[in-house]
């Protein structure tokens, strides 16, 4: 029996991971979340008995230590964080406080002999692109805004805990991951929600900024394989799709697939944090996953049909 902690496990990606983990009866999964953006509706089904939810702020040493020192986890997935472009810009101090959570998780993992800690970093560490596609080892990091800086500092903490204390880690650099349980701060869920309601779809700037997208199932399947097949030990790996879409085309595709009458409205560009382009070199991920990624069109259709996607 492996005991696994998923912080942020009531969120979009952490919840999807937790729901996948509980399918294996040899895993006992504890989900720690403060429900700031997460929701209990994203937790695994009660038909599974091998999981538990604990309301916990990982940035509070008292709260997370009570959980980690009692449980002696084998593996930890640290996914809790303040997320979303708008929310992170409006709450920079709360974002910076996430450094406390990273340090707490590492310190307690080291002290309780955790076998490996997995960290959800972000494509944001690459900042405005210096080169494309963005490669884990060769692309220089260009983190500027607090959210990106925190992920960058976080990565540095993980490498340092391995170097000094021998604590094994894997850093996932997630690129735009979308799915039915995503909060409305993210582009796909926001656009789809507006399209299904027939509301205007608003775009910052002219919409020529591009993004790549990864359906949450591909993210979870890749991370599960990395964990279960022991890949990317003490390493960093991009997790994302590599096909670029202009934001304006994403809006048009969503309107098209959903058969919506929504109009596209342009707002002034965001002053910071809205990168012009981003694209992973996902060679390492594809080699591990060993299958084609779900296309954006298919992902949108899956979201529309998914019982968890609620407007
Ligand atoms: N979804 C993406 O496109 C994407 C891209 C890059 C990185 N990431 C990273 O992946 C992780 C998961 O993101 P997501 O998209 O699922 O977002 P999400 O907001 O759905 O999930 C984050 C979860 O963390 C919880 N949380 C936040 N602060 C907490 C705290 N102090 N203590 C306990 N719980 C806390 C929230 O309640 C929420 O359930 C985050 O670390 C995020 O930075 C996501």
Image (tube, helix red, strand yellow):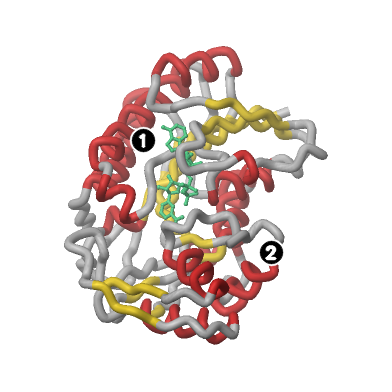
Q: In the displayed image of the protein, which residue is found farthest to the right? A: 47
Could you tell me which residue is drawn at 58 percent across and 18 percent down?
72
- Of the numbered discs 1 and 2, the one sitting upstream in the chain is 1
Q: Quadrant of the C terminus?
A: bottom right
The location of residue 151, given as percent across then percent down, is 31, 44
Q: Is residue 291 left or right of residue 123?
A: right
Q: Quadrant of the N terminus?
A: top right
276 up-or-down from 3: above or below: below
The label on residue 158 is 1
Q: Is residue 307 left or right of residue 168?
A: right
243 up-or-down from 308: above or below: below
Could you tell me which residue is drawn at 40 percent across and 40 percent down?
81
Q: Quadrant of ligand 1?
A: top left
Residue 146 can be seen in this image: yes
Labels 1 and 2 touching (C-beta < 8 A): no
Determine the secondary structure under disc 2: loop
294 up-or-down from 171: above or below: below
Ligand 1 contact, mark 2 (Cβ < 8 Å): no
Determine the secondary structure under disc 1: helix
Could you tell me which residue is drawn at 44 percent across and 27 percent down?
58
The residue carrying pointer 1 sits among few (fewer than 14), some (14 to 19) or many (20 or more) residues within 10 Å by Cα, namely many
**Which residue is under mark 2?**
306
The location of residue 63, given as percent across then percent down, is 47, 18
């Amino acid at each position: 029996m492996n005991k696994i902690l998923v912080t942020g496990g009531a969120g979009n990606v952490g919840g999807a991971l937790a729901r996948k983990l509980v399918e294996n009866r040899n895993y006992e999964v504890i989900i720690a979340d403060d429900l700031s953006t997460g929701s209990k509706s994203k937790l695994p089904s009660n038909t599974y008995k091998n999981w538990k939810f604990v309301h916990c702020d990982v940035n509070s040493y008292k709260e997370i230590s009570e959980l980690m020192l009692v449980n002696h986890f084998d593996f930890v997935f640290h996914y809790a964080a303040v997320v979303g472009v708008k929310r992170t810009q409006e709450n920079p101090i709360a974002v910076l406080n996430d450094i406390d959570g990273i340090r707490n998780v590492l310190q307690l993992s080291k002290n309780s002999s955790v076998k490996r800690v997995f960290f959800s970093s972000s494509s944001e560490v690459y900042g405005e692109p210096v080169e494309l596609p963005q490669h884990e080892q060769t692309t220089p990091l260009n983190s500027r805004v607090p959210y990106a800086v925190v992920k960058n500092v976080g990565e540095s903490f993980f490498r340092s805990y391995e170097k000094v204390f021998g604590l094994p880690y894997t850093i996932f650099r997630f690129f735009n991951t979308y799915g039915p349980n995503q909060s409305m701060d993210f582009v796909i869920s926001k656009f789809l929600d507006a399209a299904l309601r027939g509301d205007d779809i608003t775009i910052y700037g002219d919409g020529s900024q591009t993004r790549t997208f990864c359906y949450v199932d591909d993210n979870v399947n890749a991370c599960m394989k990395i964990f279960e097949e022991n890949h990317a030990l003490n390493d960093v790996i991009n997790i994302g799709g590599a096909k670029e879409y202009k934001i304006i085309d994403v809006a048009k595709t969503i309107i098209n697939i959903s058969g919506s009458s929504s109009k596209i409205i342009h707002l002034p560009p965001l002053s910071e944090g809205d990168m012009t382009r981003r694209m992973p070199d996902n060679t390492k991920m594809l080699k591990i996953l060993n299958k084609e990624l779900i296309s954006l069109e298919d992902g949108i259709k899956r979201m529309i049909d998914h019982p968890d996607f609620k407007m």
